[in-house]
Image (cartoon, rainbow, N blue to C red):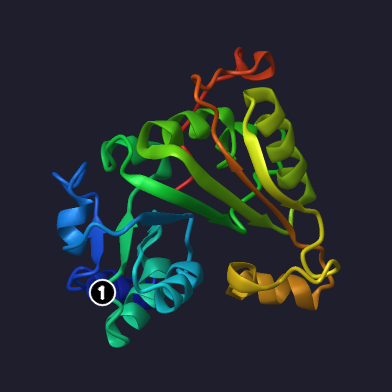
């Protein structure tokens, strides 16, 4: 591990807004934030731009950026501390273990922003909108909670639409070209480090928001014979 990464890991060990594989947090996030405000997760948050910016704009809501890479979490956590954003926290875990850290009905909304689309053949199971992840989200989200996907990957976007249809999810908004349709407003106007790079390259940005079905999430037949592995750390 490089010297800069070691410095960042040492720093987040001292940050009160960063929890690393914490024990006893499942069902206790209201106590951590000291309020009963709704909780939104940013999965594979990277530098945490969405968590920080949403936290700035909506002080009556709580935001938790989740990523396994502590050196990335460092950036958002430091900004949140410096700005006194007590409604923004970061959780360092593997997302595949998310049900170990949140209880049923504890999460109101999820954002998946420019997550790894895992384009290699056989890696679809690692996509954060794969059915196995939707099953995990269903165990921690309130009924009717919103899942937001924002991505430059048409493969991931199309895969998500296919999964949504298979599972009988409810689509709330589907924008195949945010900027082309002039819809980069409100929460969609927040730009991450990677989004700025993608826009400079002229890439199309896709967005879809949806809710999970009332019934259980099933494993589509196309995936039933494939091994399930934890996402890349």
User: Callout 1 environment at 10 Å: few (<14), some (14 to 19), or many (20+)?
Assistant: some
Q: Is residue 137 depicted above or below 178 in this figure? A: above
Across and down, in percent, residue 138 comes to 44, 32
Instruction: Find residue 212 and report its image quarter.
Output: top right
Q: Is residue 197 depicted above or below 36 in this figure? A: below
Q: Is residue 229 left or right of residue 64?
A: right
SS assignment at label 1: loop
Q: Is residue 112 depicted above or below 73 in this figure? A: above
Across and down, in percent, residue 137 comes to 44, 37
As drawn, the residue found furthest toward the bottom would be 82
Q: In this view, does 79 lie to the left or right of 184?
A: left
- Name the one closer to the observer, 204 or 227: 204
Q: Is residue 148 depicted above or below 210 in this figure? A: below
> Which residue bears the numbered disc 1?
86
Query: Is residue 191 visible from the viewing direction of this image?
Result: no
- Name the one closer to the observer, 123 or 140: 140
Assign the N terminus to one quadrant of the image.
Answer: bottom left
Instruction: Find residue 221 and report its image quarter.
Output: top right
The residue lying at 81 percent from left, 54 percent from top is 176
Query: Is residue 150 visible from the viewing direction of this image?
Result: yes
Across and down, in percent, residue 169 comes to 62, 32
């Amino acid at each position: 591990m490089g010297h800069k990464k070691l410095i960042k890991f040492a720093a987040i060990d001292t940050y009160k807004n960063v929890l690393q594989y914490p024990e006893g947090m499942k069902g206790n996030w209201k106590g951590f934030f000291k309020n009963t405000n709704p909780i939104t997760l940013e999965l594979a948050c990277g530098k945490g731009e969405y968590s920080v910016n949403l936290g700035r704009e909506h002080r009556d809501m709580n935001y938790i950026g989740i990523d396994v890479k502590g050196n990335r979490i460092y950036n958002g956590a430091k900004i949140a501390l410096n700005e006194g954003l007590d409604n923004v926290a970061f959780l360092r875990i593997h997302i595949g273990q998310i049900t170990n850290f949140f209880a049923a009905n504890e999460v109101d909304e999820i954002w998946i922003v420019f997550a790894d689309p895992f384009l290699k053949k056989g890696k679809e199971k690692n996509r954060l909108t794969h059915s196995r992840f939707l099953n995990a989200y269903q165990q921690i989200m309130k009924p009717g909670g919103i899942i937001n996907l924002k991505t430059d990957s048409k493969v991931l976007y199309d895969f998500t639409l296919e999964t949504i249809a298979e599972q009988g999810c409810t689509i709330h908004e589907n924008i195949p070209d945010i900027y082309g349709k002039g819809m980069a407003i409100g929460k969609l106007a927040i730009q991450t480090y990677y989004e700025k790079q993608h826009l400079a390259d002229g890439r199309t940005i896709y967005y879809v928001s949806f809710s999970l079905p009332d019934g259980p999430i099933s494993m589509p037949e196309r995936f039933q014979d494939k091994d399930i592995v934890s996402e890349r750390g």
